[in-house]
Image (cartoon, rainbow, N blue to C red):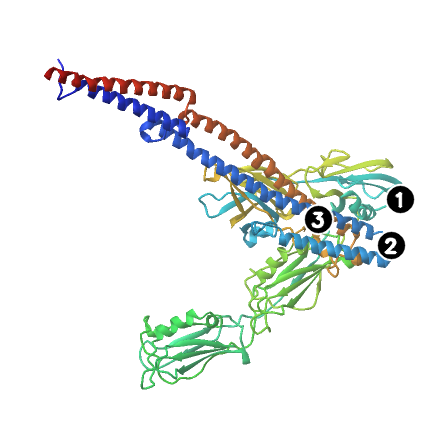
């Protein structure tokens, strides 16, 4: 039976057509976009997985981009450092050539010095102008900012922060403790004065030297001969007298300053009423006297609408009081106190307070007779605890013209702090002055001691400490006359022990004695149990840095961790087991985001130190000193400045630049380039995985398209037949 009203066959045919068209449209969409999942309904689970992989792909692509950028930055810095290295080698050649004074005229030496000056200027110019993207690279702006206390600074001769990642922390604390002290290569000789002609070859890390001794050579002769060849061998000699079990006496001088500290002057402005008095106290005891006394002047404002104010001219503080229409003061004491404390020029001269008998509010109106309040401190005196003991560091080795001396002077500018400079064996301490530039009451003995011990060149000559019974808290009264530190030599008794040691510490340092003629027996330690040997090698320091064992080189301990790559060198005086030092990294450096994760694991924090003539160099000095008029030029070579001094500075500078280039190169090769390679492989695999999920299979989808087209056409034919059936029924009505 055929029904006309509800053509079920036609509806079924229509549904088939719609389904076929939907499949056809889906195939057309996938083939046209190349993507299998075009909306969430296509594959919800596949969409989630593909979007996760897409996010990871973007992160990897960005990391590769960042890594390439970082690589470019480092390559730029390395290129500039290469030029600086070339200039340093050029300087070395010019210095070595200029030292050939027997074959060069003074004009030729001057020409070499001119080239050296030009090269030094070029180094500074490269350091200041090497940029990438507008950022300077090697002027020190990309080095880490560190903070170290005076105490810890005295223990450390040098430290370098190469890499650091702060993460969520604002600072990084570097704690170092000496676990095993570094050692020099050391041999001992206890054979007494020589009784026969002796020839020895003494060798060290620098080189070898053959020494000849007569049959009557004393300990002093042996010591002096070895020390005369120290620059050639790297071996130095000293001795003690075992008969007295004491070293040769180091020279000492006590810089004494007596007196008592001046009390800061005070003045109280008393006015009528309650809680309206004001008390003033000079900021610095003994800083102002006579015509330089601080004064406080009160006045009324000329305009009733003006508020109270504080102004300073020289050592005079003027307080202008607010007044009413009747020209009477309406200024409240607490307001005056607040205004005074907010004025830095005023507080630099004096402090203000409310006298105790006025209570605590200061609510009273300042009125009464407006007069000057003068804070006269009287004469400048100095506190106890200000005596300083200066001791010659090396017993019996500094004699004659090499005896250290120390002199004190005043700075020319009141804004300058205490500083120390060294020329040869002469040490000059320039003391800070107050605003009057007439006294030194702001400088305590402890500050002077810290300044001397904190200067590498000065600390190599002397040690400053508190005299007996002093704590260094007293203000230091200076004398401008140079104080000479005399030492005494030990005598060459047959019971003495001659110590032969390498100049430096570490496993690369050694002392070796080869006896070519005569008798010269050396031992590995002092005492009756000594073992006779002819060679001894030093040992490197071992330290614990932030809980990690840091094997050192000489006195330098280095640590390399995930978040910190650093190195620090202990002073020889602090090269003892259990000695600690602490450095706080407060910021700075260059942060490179080279990983996918925005965390310490994906970041590289690297410091690039300043590479200019003021920073290049080492223990021997800084490279700028080789310039004309700087003290170590070719024209300064003579009795007090050796050619070796100049070469050592250059070599230390070359090593510093080479080390920096090597570190940057290692980061490039082992970190950045490997990171780019590994990220590239990861990107390939993750992209392939995402393709499996989301990309269209063109072969399968083309077959599906053909199928959908056939079904669509068939469905249309069926729908046509279904629609024709009712027409045939209508013929029955005819």
Disc 3: which residue? 246
Disc 2 element: loop
Disc 1: which residue? 214
Residue 353 appears anywhere in the view = no
Q: Earlier in the sequence, mark 2 or mark 1?
A: 2
Q: Residues within 10 Å of mark 2 (few under 14, many from 20)?
A: few
- Which corner quadrant of the image does residue 299 belong to? bottom left
Q: Nearer the viewer, residue 536 or 144?
A: 144
Left or right: where does residue 37 sit relative to residue 566?
left
- Which corner quadrant of the image does residue 626 belong to? bottom right
Give the residue at the far top of this rendering.
1
Depth check, mark 3 against mark 1: the one in front is: 1
Q: Nearer the viewer, residue 583 or 27?
A: 27
How far across and how far down the image is residue 101, in percent? 86, 54
Disc 1 element: loop
Q: Residues within 10 Å of mark 3 (few under 14, many from 20)?
A: few
Q: CA distance from mark 3 to mark 1?
A: 28 Å
Disc 3 element: strand
How far across and how far down the image is residue 539, in percent? 67, 37
Q: Quadrant of the C terminus?
A: top left
How far across and how far down the image is residue 445, in percent? 58, 62
Q: Which mark is residue 646?
A: none
Depth check, mark 2 against mark 1: the one in front is: 2
Q: Nearer the viewer, residue 639 or 713?
A: 713
Residue 71 lies, with reference to residue 303, above or below; the image says: above
Q: Quadrant of the N terminus?
A: top left
Disc 2: which residue? 104
Q: CA distance from mark 2 to mark 1?
A: 38 Å
Q: Nearer the viewer, residue 464 or 547?
A: 547
Residue 194 lies, with reference to residue 28, above or below; the image says: below
Q: CA distance from mark 2 to mark 3?
A: 50 Å
């Amino acid at each position: 039976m055929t029904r006309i009203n509800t053509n079920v066959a036609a509806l079924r045919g229509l549904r088939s057509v719609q389904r076929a068209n939907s499949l056809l449209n889906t195939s057309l969409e996938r083939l046209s976009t190349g993507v299998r999942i075009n909306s969430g309904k296509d594959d919800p689970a596949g969409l989630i997985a593909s979007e996760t992989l897409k996010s990871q792909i973007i992160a990897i692509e960005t990391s590769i981009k960042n890594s390439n950028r970082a690589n470019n930055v480092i390559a730029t810095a390395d290129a500039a450092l290469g030029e600086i290295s070339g200039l340093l080698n050029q300087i070395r050649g010019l210095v070595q050539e200029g030292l050939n004074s027997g074959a060069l005229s003074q004009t030729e030496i001057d020409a070499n010095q001119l080239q050296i000056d030009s090269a030094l200027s070029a180094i500074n110019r490269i350091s200041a102008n090497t940029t990438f993207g507008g950022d300077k690279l090697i002027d020190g702006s990309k080095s880490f900012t560190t903070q170290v206390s005076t105490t810890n600074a005295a223990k450390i001769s040098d430290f370098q922060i190469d890499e650091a990642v702060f993460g969520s922390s604002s600072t990084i604390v570097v704690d170092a403790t000496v676990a095993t002290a570094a050692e020099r290569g050391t041999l001992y000789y206890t054979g007494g004065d020589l009784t026969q002609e002796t020839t020895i070859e003494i060798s060290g890390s620098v080189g070898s030297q053959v020494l000849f001794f007569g049959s009557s050579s004393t300990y002093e002769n042996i010591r002096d001969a070895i020390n005369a060849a120290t620059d050639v061998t790297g071996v130095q000699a000293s001795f003690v007298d075992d008969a007295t079990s004491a070293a040769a006496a180091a020279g000492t001088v006590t810089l004494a300053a007596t007196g008592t500290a001046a009390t800061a002057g005070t003045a109280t402005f008393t006015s009528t009423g309650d809680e309206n008095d004001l008390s003033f106290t000079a900021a610095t005891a003994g800083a102002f006297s006579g015509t330089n006394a601080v004064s406080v002047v009160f006045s009324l404002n000329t305009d009733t609408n003006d508020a109270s104010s504080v102004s300073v001219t020289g050592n005079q503080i003027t307080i202008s009081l607010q007044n009413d229409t009747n020209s009477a003061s309406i200024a409240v004491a607490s307001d005056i106190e607040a205004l005074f404390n907010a004025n830095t020029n005023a507080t630099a001269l004096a402090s203000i307070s409310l006298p105790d008998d006025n209570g605590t509010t200061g609510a009273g109106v300042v009125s009464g007779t407006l007069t000057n309040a003068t804070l006269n401190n009287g004469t400048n005196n100095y506190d106890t605890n200000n005596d300083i003991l200066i001791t010659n560091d090396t017993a019996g080795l500094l004699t004659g013209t090499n005896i250290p001396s120390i002199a004190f002077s005043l700075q020319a500018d009141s804004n300058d702090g205490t500083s120390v400079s060294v020329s040869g064996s002469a040490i000059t301490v320039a003391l800070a002055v107050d605003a009057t530039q007439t006294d030194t009451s702001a400088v305590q003995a402890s500050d002077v001691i810290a300044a001397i011990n904190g200067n590498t060149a000065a600390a190599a000559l002397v040690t400053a400490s508190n005299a007996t019974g002093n704590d260094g808290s007293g203000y230091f009264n200076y004398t401008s006359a140079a104080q000479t530190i005399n030492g005494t030599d030990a005598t060459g008794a047959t019971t003495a022990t001659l110590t032969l040691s390498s100049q430096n510490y570490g496993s690369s340092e050694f002392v070796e004695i080869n006896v070519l003629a005569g008798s010269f027996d050396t031992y590995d330690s002092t005492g009756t149990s000594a073992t006779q040997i002819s060679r001894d090698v030093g040992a490197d320091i071992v330290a614990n840095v932030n809980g990690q064992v840091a094997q050192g080189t000489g006195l330098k301990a280095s640590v390399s961790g995930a978040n910190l790559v650093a190195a620090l060198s202990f002073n020889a005086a602090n090269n003892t087991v259990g000695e600690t030092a602490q450095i706080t990294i407060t910021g700075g450096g260059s942060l490179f985001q080279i990983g996918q994760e925005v965390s310490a694991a994906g970041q590289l924090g690297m410091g690039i130190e300043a590479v200019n003539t003021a920073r290049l160099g080492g223990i021997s000095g800084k490279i700028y000193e080789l310039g004309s008029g700087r003290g170590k030029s070719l024209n300064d070579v003579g009795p007090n400045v050796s050619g070796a001094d100049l070469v050592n500075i250059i070599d230390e500078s070359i090593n510093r630049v080479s080390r920096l280039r090597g570190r940057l190169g290692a980061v490039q090769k082992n970190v950045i380039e490997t990171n780019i390679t590994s990220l590239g492989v990861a990107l390939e695999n993750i992209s392939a995985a995402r393709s499996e999920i989301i990309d269209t299979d063109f072969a399968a989808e083309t077959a599906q398209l053909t199928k959908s087209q056939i079904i669509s056409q068939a469905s249309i034919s069926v729908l046509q037949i279904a629609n024709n059936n009712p027409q045939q029924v209508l013929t029955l009505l005819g």
